[in-house]
Image: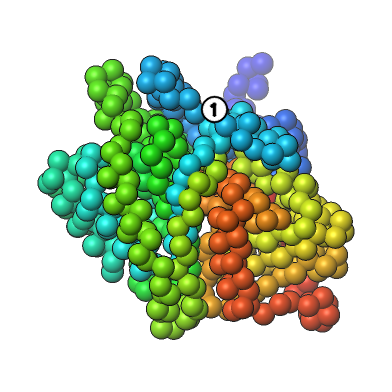
Amino acid sequence: MEAIIDALTTGQYFAAWSWSDFAGMGLVLHIILMVVMSLRVVSVQRNIGVTIAWIAVLYILPLVGFFAYILVGEPMIGRRYRERMGQASLLMNDMAVRERLIFNQGQELLSDSYSGVSRIGTRRTGFGVFPGHQMQLLTSPQTIFNHFIHDIENAKRTIFMEFYIIYPKGQVLDVLKALEAAVKRGVECHLLVDSVGSFSFFNSAEHRALERAGVFVHQSLPVGLLKTLFKRSDLRNHRKIVVVDEYIGYTGSFNLVDPRYFKQDKNVGQWIDLMIRSVSEQPVSIATAMAKVVVTDIGAENNDNLHALHQRVNSYTRKLYVLNPTINDINSRIEVLADETHDVVPEVGSTSILIPQMPAVDNVLAQLIPSAPQLTAHVIYNTLVTVIHRANKRIQITTPYFVPDEPLSGALVTAAKRGVDVTLIIPEKVDSFLVQHASQAYYQELLEVGVKIALFKGGLLHAKTVVVDDDYCLFGTVNIDMRSFYLNMEVSLAIYTPEMVAQVADCQEVYLQNCRFLSLEEWQQRPDSQRLFDNVVRLFSPLL
């Protein structure tokens, strides 16, 4: 024993080790680490594609894969955030009960073919189907900005806005000025903005000016070095919601950016987006559901917000949900919509497409479906796969990023084999190299069964719409990729009224006129090296 201690203190014990001994021990530690991490991945992940992708990363790039999985491998939104979200949701639900606002209603309004689909959303979100909306599809940035500014300028009580990106250039500045003016009139304005998506906004003079004016600006899912140890930094708030006076609501793919100034260095053209404006005089509507989502999201961000929400709910709940707005208020907004049915002048450049401004549609039946990791399961994904499987005539999907998993791509393939007319409308060029190639890896199997792939040539088509048959539409913020389905906070509208579904389909038809259709023969003529690269990237597509 004394000899061993003496050897250790003099370094002779380690000197006796050779490089092969160290290499052998390193190999043993590597194997143990890989086995432990593989077991962790298999036990935690529920998606087979995600599981295989992570195991591939761990074995191909062991050290990088280990730290990557620790940081972003599991959808941890944070224990404290989940607790605050639960408390905020409970506060809002209790208030709704006191005010006799019933959100999980309306199943009887649907046909049998969609009642089951609707229940998927109701079960996970608490929102049912709401009738009696007047909705208008807004198809150009100018129209969207005009409606934003008009409704902000006519707001009487509250404005809630929630965006992934605010880029304070161009007409966005007019919207921000209108918010500052609204505060001066006594309107309470809240702006919830994603910390990463709007990083430049939070460091801008415009942000400081809003706060000085009295606008409540909240940072959604803030990031930091310490925070990454307890939650994933790439879980983002991708929602786009505007609520004015609790009976006017907007959602869609449109970030608060002017496309003439946004990401013009990416060589993909201007971003092309859609929004839907919804107006209802019902006590419970899409707008009140949106308000509930935004208020809950704000309350979950930090303890101060949660405390403020608690005080608000227990003191003057009518401020959050104003029942029975005057009919004159409603009519003033309907008249504005009815007057603006002229064609929109096309932008000069890559977005020179003419989409006629759509008239408002009355008596629309719709359901709001918000989703969030670890909070609502995969409600939008499950809804989408279900409606694809029940489609009878057609499926038309517009999405900027198409990276499905096997069940979703299989649902599209099966639908085409059943004789359903399946059309996929995607940009010819996107702003992500890896996403572009991961997407292309799915084209062969889709083209072989007759799926039409239309490549949009007029810019980065950022709209996210799914039309099924003639009587169902999913419209909102969700891309057809695993990040949107599993990692981001998103929101979609399920629309059940054929007249409104037809407007979205008409808009898709205009997009199709500016597309080139990819043929199977053309795709099969690609070099083998390109096909191999796409398939390699596809292995990691669940992680993109």
Vertical placement of 494 versus 100: above or below?
below
Left or right: 364 in relation to 117: left
Left or right: 319 in relation to 134: left
The picture places residue 502, in percent across and down from the top left corner, at 60, 60
Mark 1 element type: loop
The picture places residue 311, in percent across and down from the top left corner, at 26, 21
Near-viewer residue (128 or 219): 128
Query: Quarter of the image containing the C terminus?
Result: bottom right
Q: Residue at the spot x=78%, y=47% of the render? A: 389
Near-viewer residue (361 or 511): 361
Quarter of the view holding residue 451: bottom right
Residue 372 seen in the figure = no
Left or right: 460 in relation to 39: left
- Residue on which disc 1 sits: 104
The picture places residue 476, in percent across and down from the top left corner, at 52, 51
Amino acid of disc 1: Asn
Q: Residue at the spot x=65%, y=21% of the render? A: 3
